[in-house]
Amino acid sequence: MPETVSNNAVAKVQTLKGLYFLSFMGLAQGKTFSDVHNRSWALKEGEAQWKQIEPVPSSSKLKGRLASVAVGIKDKAYLFGGYTVAEDHSEVSSPDNYAYDVINDRYQLIAASPVAVDDAVALTYQQRYVYLIGGWHNDGNVNLAQLYDSDTDSWQQATPFPGAAVFGHAGGIVGNQLIVCDGVKVEVKENEKRSFSSQAACYSGLINKQNINKIEWHSIPHPTGKARYRMAATGLSLPQSGIVFAGGSYNPYNYTGIGYDGMPSIPDNKLWFYSFEQTRWFVGKMNTASMDHRGLLISNNNSMVIIGGMRHQQEVSNQIQVIPSSILKFD
């Protein structure tokens, strides 16, 4: 990319003019409050250069956001939530949601979520609906599954997430099957300041095709028993149908990459893939360890694409990591 960026919302959009990879907002190399920005970029598949697009609008005085999520529906990208960071380090969950038209380089404000969240998981269904699962709202986590209808620009509530309310989790969807894993929960103790702890847990959900508000949730075995924070994840149809999780860190952290325990967080290179056909996990590795992601994209040749993120020693990256899906092979 033309600049380094981490914690950026990413999406891919298929248009009549081709496939576009999009990166919205995020954190620049300095990793201070003033490095949180709203700059955005687009890359048309097959072209050699990224193009800077219009910055994401904001109803706040602070224009930049972190921990937003984005998805592609038909020929538009949809952006949800995130949080602003002030000079005094206060963080506020943003109510702003937008639809972005890549061909005309234009944003349209869409209906605000019932509960504004950041560090949530956004999953698309039937190229129309978005399930916004969990995340952080100003002072604490929520267990909501907020359901957005892009045709009617309206919200409703789906069956809540059954596990501990978390932020920084990851998930993907194929058809009406989804999986959400890990994240960070709040620990509340008597006469002590609250703290954050990793949650090693995975849940599968089955959307009721006759009533999309209903999700039948079940817990499934965790692939390693050790939680990762801010992985890149997506649904994948080949080589098998399932959900893939990439990178992240075992040590949850603030936006600087320094853990809540005061220790620098280290990126991971693990790949997890849960096969719906075989109902089991594949655990492998990608070439380069990375963390601080908001999504994993799939190219037209079925490769997985990670845009930016943090690398070794919390260095903000401008690199694009391409991972062939053929790596996801069971023994």
Image: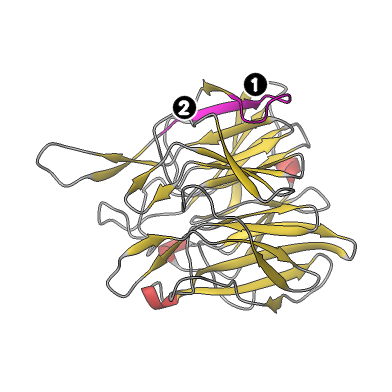
The kind of secondary structure element at disc 1 is: loop
Q: Is residue 69 visible?
A: yes
Badge nearest the viewer, 1 or 2: 2
Image vertical order of residue 52 relative to residue 112, above or below: below
Image location (x, y in percent) of residue 69: 57, 55
Q: Identify the residue position indicated by label 2 in the image.
A: 162
Q: Quadrant of residue 83?
A: bottom left
Q: Quadrant of the N terminus?
A: bottom right
Q: Identify the residue position indicated by label 1 in the image.
A: 279
**Along the polypeptide, which appears first: circle 1 or circle 2?**
2
- Residue 202 is a magenta residue: yes
The kind of secondary structure element at disc 2 is: loop
Residue lying at 58% horizontally and 77% vertically, measured from the top left: 3
Image location (x, y in percent) of residue 188: 22, 38
Q: Quadrant of residue 166?
A: top left
Image location (x, y in percent) of residue 152: 71, 48
> In the image, what residue type sits under mark 1?
Thr
Residue 256 is labelled as none
Q: Is residue 285 visible?
A: no
Q: Is residue 12 or residue 211 the one in the foreground?
A: 211
- Report the magenta residues as a range: 200-215
Q: Is residue 330 or residue 191 the one in the foreground?
A: 191
Image location (x, y in percent) of residue 276: 69, 25
> In the image, what residue type sits under mark 2?
Pro
Image vertical order of residue 266 relative to residue 242, above or below: below
Q: Residues within 10 Å of mark 1 (few under 14, many from 20)?
A: few
Residue lying at 30% horizontally and 68% vertically, measured from the top left: 89
